[in-house]
Amino acid sequence: MDLNRKLYRSNTNRMLCGVCGGIGEYLGIDPTLIRLLWALVACSGAGIVVYFLAAIIIPQEPSSSY
């Protein structure tokens, strides 16, 4: 396990802001599973607010252009 890895919003696995894609990449699982879980949480109402807070707090993945 790499202890130096950081959580970023994904540039490639994104639907809205890249939060679920970034979490999926960080955890090493399919971002679709994260999206499904987040959709269930969003049905409770708080999930939508938490998603956009995460989009503000989690930094964008640095571009890999050389």
Image: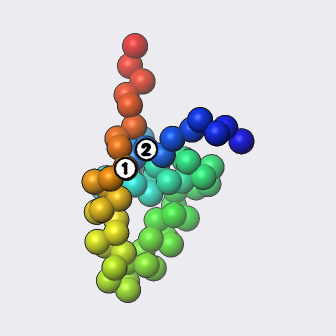
Mark pair 2, 1: CA separation: 6 Å
**Which residue, as the protein is rendered here, is positioned at the far bottom?**
44
Q: Is residue 44 visible?
A: yes
Label 1 crowding class (10 Å Cα cut-off): few <14, some 14-19, many 20+? some
Q: Is residue 59 left or right of residue 33?
A: left
Three-letter amino acid code of the residue under disc 1? Ile
**Which residue, as the protein is rendered here, is positioned at the far right?**
1
| Residue 38 x, y percent position in the rendering | 44, 71
Which residue is tagged 1?
Answer: 58
Which residue is tagged 2?
Answer: 8
Quick check: marks 2 and 1 in contact, CB under 8 Å? yes
Residue sitting at 51 percent across and 64 percent down? 34
Residue sitting at 35 percent across and 43 percent down? 59
Q: Is residue 15 visible?
A: no
Q: Is residue 35 left or right of residue 49?
A: right
Residue sitting at 30 percent across and 62 percent down? 53
